[in-house]
Amino acid sequence: MRSNNPGTTGRETYAVANGTTFKSCACKDSATGKRLGKSCPRLRIAHSDGGQRWSTAHGTWGYQLELPAHSDGKRQNPLRRRGFATLEDAEAELEHARDLLALDPDPAVRRQITALMLSVLKDTKRLPDVEKVRRKVRTRQDLNRNVTVEEWLAEFLKRKRAIEPTTRRSYESHVRLYLNPYLGSIRLDQLRVSDIAGMFDAIEEFNDTIATERASGDPARILAVRYRRPVGTTSMHRIRATLRHALNMAIRQDRLLDFNPASVVELPAIDRPKPIVWTEEKVMQWRKDHAAHLNLLQRAREGRRVDPIAAYISAPRPSSVMVWTAKQTKAFLAHARKDRLFVLYRLIATRGLRRGESVGLRKVDVNYATCRIGIHWQITQLGWAPIQGAPKTDASDREIAVDAETMTLLKDHDKCQRRERLAAGKDWTESGFVFTDEIGRPLHPQHVTDRFYGICYQAGLPPIRLHDLRHGAATAMLAAGVDIKIVQETLGHTSSAFTRDTYTSIYPEAAAAAAEATAAFLTGSPAPAPRPVPPGRRTPRLRQDVKNAAAEDTGGTVTILPTN
């Protein structure tokens, strides 16, 4: 037998229990039937020098290690392990066990380490990894409790206190709908890249199921997925970002992991929807698609009434982001003029306000003298509940210029609101917002969207989202030659590069004018009557016509900056 003396592991300076190695076999005594174990004579063979050496063909190696006593002081059975092919293998595991017991001098912690060693040996026939146990000891974790992904995500949400309500809701929905169902039962320290990739594969398979059911033509199958929404690429990236953030916290704060598997999972690149203009050809095709979609819904409803606005909104369209032409935008504004929120829609259409910014416009932020309004407050939605607060970014918190006609309409709107206040009497609520309901309360953002769709439907226009009015305003500003930096600041973007990359739609008339102007420049042929052209260098002859056309389309004066 060989004895391993007490010593240090490099970090600890206290003594660890002695350990011994031995060799034994399963031979039995022929008389008694008892195992010979370490006393079997065949374990050693004669050596040429007259001594003995260990047999390489008989028996196996093992080790024995004294374990810390129980909490009541009673001696615990030593750790005995047999079956090693070589002495080196037995000594290596003995040293491994000694390193584990040397991680902390606290007797209570050493008893936890002992319990962990015995438990892992029973399940896996191997000792736990020293570094993983060291990390748990250092962070004072319960060594005999395995944290699951679901348990850690709950802890993650608990620790995220100083975040926006909308961000918290996004985290919670990702955890509830995707991360817990697919990954929640997996031990956190055993979460693999393949587990996360498998979750996204399952999500994509379910997307295919939704598409198949909706295209089946079977009313029952269509109804079965009526309220199920496919998970798009952008949403998948956000789900992964939530998981990556939670795992990074586990690495930095509690050192539960050495590696973040969510950081290397590959997903398809986010394909930002390209804004497409509603040309006459696309409108004609949409009307056919709308009729077919309406017929499908009527069949699914089996004769019951179909909501015409819902059918109008949900009909297929060329892109999720559609932009009206200047003529279509003018038709919308003409139809919306009789609506009490007309000025709100005009601000979105001409100045590119976001929905929450228009609903949250306050009276104190309107400067009639300078024809400017301040975007310093907004009303957004958290689920259904409206949430008030300042814009999230410095770029969104801004002041913008407004044309004179819109300012006049804002004054008229204020007069109408005063008359509503007199009519409401004591029921009036003074909220301080420019746009309110009939008794002065702040508008719910969804109410503004619902009214918008109703106006679009009644006007006979192809559908766009309310947010697409903002896209239209950006496209109109760029087509009118407004400097990209001014467009960026008006829209509240953080960079002009984002503005340039996002708003690439060009009105057909502007594209045609650009083609004619280019041909005239190269061939010397006279150009036709000038029309609005896209951003770029312009001849002096076209500039005033562009300015006049843009002013007519946006209902106000558009400034054309000089080109260098």
Image (cartoon, rainbow, N blue to C red):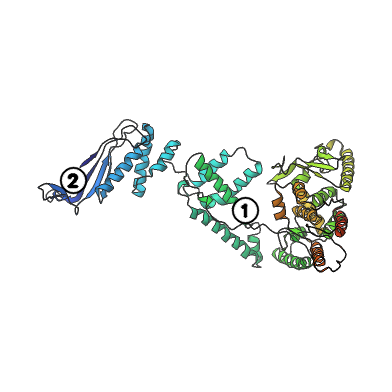
**Which label number is shown at residue 235?**
1
Residue 82, given in percent of the width and then of the height, sits at: 26, 47
Q: Residues within 10 Å of mark 2 (few under 14, many from 20)?
A: some
Work out whether residue 114 can be spotted: no
Residue 508, given in percent of the width and then of the height, sits at: 79, 64
**Which residue lies under the disc numbered 2?**
38
* Amino acid type shown at disc 1: Ser
Left or right? Give the position of 65 relative to 333. left
Residue 456, given in percent of the width and then of the height, sits at: 81, 57
Give the secondary structure at mark 2.
Answer: loop
Work out whether residue 382 can be spotted: yes
In the picture, residue 415 is in which quadrant? top right
In the picture, residue 102 is in which quadrant? top left
- Which sits in the foreground, 165 or 347? 347
**Which label number is shown at residue 152?**
none
The quadrant the N terminus occupies is top left
- Which sits in the foreground, 252 or 31? 252
Give the secondary structure at mark 1.
Answer: helix
Residue drawn 25% across the image and 50% down it = 86
Left or right? Give the position of 496 relative to 437. left
Instruction: List the single residue furthest toward the top.
Output: 73
Q: Can you say whether 267 is above or below 162 in the image?
A: below
- Which sits in the foreground, 106 or 551? 551
Q: Earlier in the sequence, mark 2 or mark 1?
A: 2
* Amino acid type shown at disc 2: Lys
Marks 2/1: CA distance? Answer: 65 Å
Residue 203, given in percent of the width and then of the height, sits at: 57, 57
Q: Can you say whether 323 is above or below 489 in the image?
A: below
Left or right? Give the position of 25 relative to 260. left
Badge count: 2
Q: Residues within 10 Å of mark 1 (few under 14, many from 20)?
A: few
Left or right? Give the position of 245 relative to 398. left
